[in-house]
Image (cartoon, grey):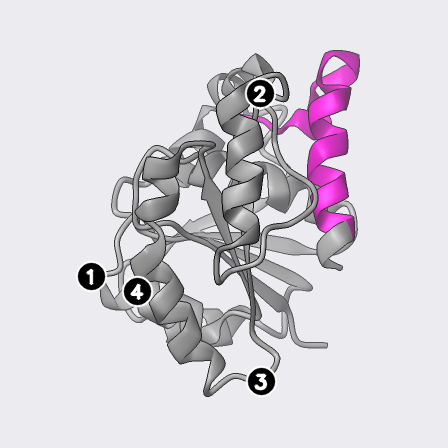
């Protein structure tokens, strides 16, 4: 069976793209063989996995791809059930466009601020172009670092409802445990009871998508 390919992308940096990619992939790995492709020149996904101790490696294989991303995705499709791509934070590279064109689902983490939403307008135009040639292609916004009691977070939910790209019902709250996972080279699924609320958030996103 050919893998389902997910691209995690946003043309604005600092939205939690790699945090979502790594924890999302770890959650998917509990459901089937999963690969992370680090297509970001900053190499954050590879660095994250590289921090893990030898006796407790990151639960998902992470490879870096700097060449033809579309070709590399197709090379691994039959070997995995899920492929998660951590894209560069820009639309100006061929790799970002190749990733989106080859993906089944694009996820766009967005911080709960109007500025971050406005930065995604150009991305929405690109997604509309892809939809015209890919009938089963899907794209969703995911609110990241949500603070439920914050008025701006509540306003963001309303703004997203009027946006061209639908937002998932589930979201990620602002939690220190996500930063700790990166520092320890692991995922929230491997951090015990203290990370259960975060793991439940990621699992809810996966269930909503699959």
Q: Which quarter of the picture shows residue 191?
A: top right
Mark earlier in primary sequence (2, 4): 4
Question: Label 1, label 2: how many angstroms apart (C-alpha)?
Answer: 32 Å
Residue at the disc numbered 3:
135
Query: Can see residue 72?
Result: no
Residue placed most toward the observer, 138 or 192: 138
Q: Position of residue 182 (x, y in %)?
A: 49, 23
Q: Position of residue 201 (x, y in %)?
A: 71, 33
x 34%, y 33%: residue: 14
Residue at the disc numbered 1:
92
Residue 142 forms part of the magenta stretch: no
Q: Position of residue 15 (x, y in %)?
A: 40, 36
User: What span is in magenta?
Assistant: 185-207
Question: Label 3, label 2: how many angstroms apart (C-alpha)?
Answer: 35 Å
Residue 95 is labelled as 4
Mark earlier in primary sequence (3, 2): 3
Question: Label 2, label 4: how many angstroms apart (C-alpha)?
Answer: 33 Å
Query: Can see residue 188?
Result: yes
x 25%, y 68%: residue: 94
């Amino acid at each position: 069976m050919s893998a389902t390919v997910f691209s995690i992308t946003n043309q604005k940096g600092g939205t939690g793209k790699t945090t979502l990619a790594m924890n999302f992939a770890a959650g998917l790995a509990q459901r089937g063989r999963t690969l992370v492709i680090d297509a970001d020149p900053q190499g954050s996904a590879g660095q994250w996995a590289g921090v893990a101790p030898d006796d407790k490696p990151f639960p998902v294989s992470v490879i870096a791809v700097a060449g033809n991303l579309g070709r590399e995705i197709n090379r691994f499709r039959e070997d995995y059930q899920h492929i998660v791509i951590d894209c560069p934070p820009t639309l100006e590279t061929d790799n970002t466009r190749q990733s989106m064109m080859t993906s089944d689902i694009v996820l766009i983490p967005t911080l709960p601020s109007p500025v971050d939403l406005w930065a995604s307008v150009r991305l929405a135009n690109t997604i509309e172009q892809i939809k015209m040639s890919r009938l089963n292609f899907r794209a969703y916004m995911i609110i990241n670092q949500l603070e439920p009691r914050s008025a701006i977070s509540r306003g963001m939910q309303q703004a997203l409802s009027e946006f061209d790209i639908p937002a998932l019902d589930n979201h990620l709250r602002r939690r220190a445990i996500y930063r700790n996972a990166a520092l320890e080279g692991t995922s929230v699924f491997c951090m015990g009871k203290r990370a259960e609320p975060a793991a439940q958030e990621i699992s809810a996103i996966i269930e909503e998508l699959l």
